Structure formats: structure tokens, C-alpha cells
Amino acid sequence: MRVLSVVGARPQFIKLAPVHKALRGEHIIVHTGQHYDFEMSALHWEQLSLPEPDYHLGVGSGSHIHHLATIMSRLEPILREEDPDWVLVYGDTNTTLAGALAASYTGQRLAHVEAGLRSRRLDMVEERNRILTDHISHMLFAPTERALENLRREGVLGSVHLVGDVMVDAMRMYMGLRDGNEVLETFGLERRKYYLLTVHRAENVDRRERLERILRAVSRADLPVLFPAHPRTRKRMAEFGLRPSGSIVLVNPVGYVEMLHLIAGARKVLTDSGGVQKEAYVLGVPCITLREETEWVETVEEGWNILVGVDEAKIVQTLRCFEPSGRRREIFGDGRAAERIASLLEGEA
């Protein structure tokens, strides 16, 4: 069986890693270069011990339409030449949709890893990417029961399978590469005596008033707030004249394994990242989400995640008072999602 995976953003590298390990046939990897910070991409790729991509499209920065058009046009000849049994796309980025459309228009069978997520916000690019990809996929791998329900409710034409979340597979594969205490010591931190902040989404980073509110609220925290800032976030902070103050400790971006240990050791996590929301839940750390909605609604319903947007009073209040109210069920699976994906693909090859 020949499988071709299309990835381009760091969260997709993480999802790709356990799938690559589980696949038993030939696996062709196409890196679109959608996330164009070379150092951050290389750091994650190296930590995950992934082989060099077979193709690198070098798309770089640009508008959503630029991403879609460029990826599709550069991917088309590769798909026609390689003619894989399956094209695999991951998550909800522009790379996901572009890979899905290119596969569809070249007559390739398409499978979507992390299918069925819904935030109910059609104004979000990620939501449109998810819905469109799901409805042209031949096989859909749902990470949770809620995602499975969403797909069945929408009546997608492809076959739908509940496999669990490959992010859990990745966490189990890679956390042991570093000692958690050693990671915390690197930053002069003690377990449960700091908060962790991540902010990278365009709606928070590209709008001065939203980013300023987040930083102002978090600066009032009663514990140090470690902030591994994405290069794009740092750039916007400089453009807007925003400087970290008070409790905020600004540091350079960290690798995937280090980030897992920083989440695990934190008192609470503040984030606008879908992946970090999941990781915090799996690691048993309360999460404060700096968005008005989430595709991971289960984490909120289970009582371990709370949506506060950029309301300063809510951010300050939840930092002080929010405590989990649920028992944290195993909603993301048992860490064997990639094995199930490989078996299902092989069964239909």
C-alpha cells in the first residue's frame, strides 16, 4: 500500500508522526511549507524523528487563496506521478483543504485524520476547511464520539470511523524523551508554581486591542506566566509597541516535547490553541481558552476547560478561581489511533 501524506503546519507534523510509524507500506510525505518559520518547523521535525519529506512545495506566507491555489497547482503533478492508494490530510489548515481538493480533482482516494470537529463558527477559516474536507473525503477518522456524531448528523458520503486522537499517540511516544523536572529547571520553574501562556491565532495576534487585553490581564497573575511566544506573535507585539510586564516571562519558542512537559507542570494553561486545549486535558491541567468558541467542546463539557475570550476581568477571575469540575473521562482514546488508521487504510487498499 502506498500512502501520500500532505502536511504543512507544526500540529500536522505531530499528527503525522504516529501515523508514519504505524503504516507498513510506502509512505510519501509532502511538506507544503505553509508555516514558513524554518527554525520552528525544523525543530519540531527533528524532535519527532521524521524522515526528510519526499517533496517540499515551499509555499511560504500569503493569503488563504494564495495558499490554496499554490498548494493545489504544485501538488497536482506529484499526485499524478505518484498515484498513491490513499492521500492523507490532517486537521483543518489551508494545507488540509488544498490537499483534499487536489486529491479529489486528480481522482485519488482521500482520507481525513481528525475529521468531524465543529466550532459552529463559519466565519472561521478552520471551520470552513474542516467541513469542505470532510464532505469530499472517502474515509473519515473521527477522534471523539462527538466528532463521529457530527459527521453522521451531516450525512457525509465517506465511511466514518471512531479511532481516537493521534495526538494522544504522539504524547505517549515522545514525552519520555526528556525528563520533566529537567525541562522545568531550564526555565527556573517549579511544578504547579507557574502558569503557561500560548497565543498564536490571527484573531488574537493581528488585532492590537485583543492582544493588549490578553497581555494586560495575564500580567496581573499571582504566579509567573511563562510565555513561549511564536515569532509572529513577537513581531506583532513589536509592531504594536506591546511589552511583557508584571508576571509575564517571555521566552523563545520551545520544542514539542518541552511544551508537553511545560503544560504538565503548569498550575493552569492559557491558550488559543486547539492542540494545547487537548494536551492540557489529557495531562490533567486546567485550561483557560482565550477564544469565544472551541472545536473541542468536550473539554468544556467535562469541566476542565473554560472559554473566556479576551475579557480581562474573566481572565483574571479564572486564573484565581477556576478549578476543574469533572472527573476527566478518557474522551480522546487509548493512544492506538494510528494503528487503527493504518489497519483501516490497508483493509481498503
Image: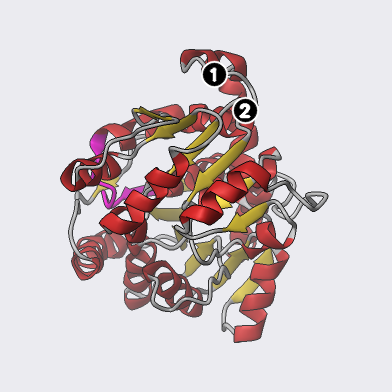
- Badge 2: few (under 14), some or many (20 or more) residues near its Cα, within 10 Å? many
**Residue 26, horizontal then vertical, whole percent:** 46, 46
**Residue 243, horizontal then vertical, whole percent:** 27, 36
Name which quarter of the figure residue 72 lies in.
bottom left
**Residue 130, horizontal then vertical, whole percent:** 46, 70
Up/down of 346 relative to 214, above or below: below
Up/down of 19 relative to 101, above or below: above
Q: Is residue 274 visible?
A: no
How are the residues colored?
A: secondary structure
Q: In which quarter of the image is the C terminus?
A: bottom right
* Disc 1 to disc 2: CB gap under 8 Å: yes
Residue assigned mark 1: 189
Residue stretch rendered in magenta on the structure: 28-38
* Front of the two marks 1 and 2: 1
Whole-number angstrom distance, CA of label 1 to CA of label 2: 9 Å
Name which quarter of the figure residue 310 lies in.
bottom left
Q: Which of 68 and 273 is in front in this view?
A: 273
Where disc 2 sits, the SS reads helix
Where disc 1 sits, the SS reads loop
Q: Which of 126 and 318 is in front in this view?
A: 318
Q: Residue at x 38, y 61 (%)?
A: 93
Q: Does the magenta run of residues contain 32?
A: yes
Q: Seen in the image, is 340 located left or right of residue 245?
A: right
Q: Can residue 30 be seen in this view?
A: yes
Q: Seen in the image, is 28 located left or right of residue 311?
A: left
Q: Looking at the image, tell me whether mark 1 or mark 2 is earlier in sequence order.
A: 1
Residue assigned mark 2: 265
Q: Nearer the viewer, residue 205 or 46?
A: 205
- Badge 1: few (under 14), some or many (20 or more) residues near its Cα, within 10 Å? some
